[in-house]
Amino acid sequence: MARPHRFRPWLRALALAGAAAALPALVQAHGDVVPQAVDIGTLPQLGAEWKPDNPYRSGAAHKEALHIGSSAYNQNCARCHGLEAVSGGIAPDLRALDTDCTSLSDPAKKQACRSEIDQYFSTTVRQGRTRDGRVYMPPFEGTLSQEAVWAIRTYIESRGAP
């Protein structure tokens, strides 16, 4: 007859203690993102006033915006939102932002929906998100230019819905 292993409770307790000790470090790391500057020298300059819609969604600068947006995303966003814009569960999956817009058949409604999401995206990136005194997303205003933010948005849109 096999006897229950007497060390199993100790192993479980040790594993739980280790996980409990690591959890605060993981939570702390989520809010401790150092924003990285983005080289936007090859993109058309958009000026000081923020555009209400993504100006790189189509047109001549689209391809360059995708290239810059991919790099900028991986430097500034991937730590929380996941590599290649695939969320690992820490932060929202940004590919899902346009889910409601893509199903609209009326072009005017689709454009209005995208415009609303663009404004939400740019405001969130610039101001960050804080709830109950906790930083869920750091503000990137002053670090990421308008061109960089719209390039990141262009890249995220290219990744498709989850």
Image (spheres, rainbow, N blue to C red):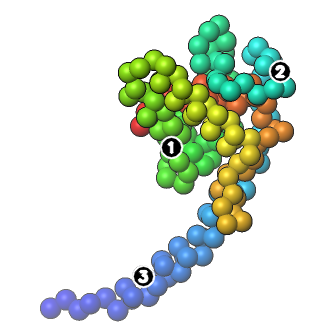
Q: Which of marks 2 and 3 is in front?
A: 2
* Residue at position x 35%, y 92% in the image: 6
Distance, label 1 to label 2, CA atoms, is 29 Å
Q: Does 116 sit above or below residue 15?
A: above
Mark 1 or mark 2, which has the lower sequence index? 2
Determine the image quadrant of residue 71.
top right
Can you name the residue that lies furthest to the left here?
Answer: 1
Q: What residue type is labelled 1?
A: Asp
Q: Which of marks 3 and 1 is in front?
A: 1
Mark 2 or mark 3, which has the lower sequence index? 3
Which element type, helix, strand or loop, lies under badge 3? helix
Q: Which amino acid does label 3 sit on?
A: Arg
* Residue 28 visible, this angle: no
Q: Does 96 sit above or below residue 56?
A: below
Q: Residue 12 carries which label?
A: 3
Q: Which mark is residue 93?
A: 1
63 to the left or right of 147: left
Badge 2: residue crowd in 10 Å (few <14, some 14–19, many ≥20):
few
**Residue underneath mark 2:** 47
Q: What residue type is labelled 2?
A: Gly
* Residue at position x 44%, y 88% in the image: 10
Mark 3 or mark 1, which has the lower sequence index? 3
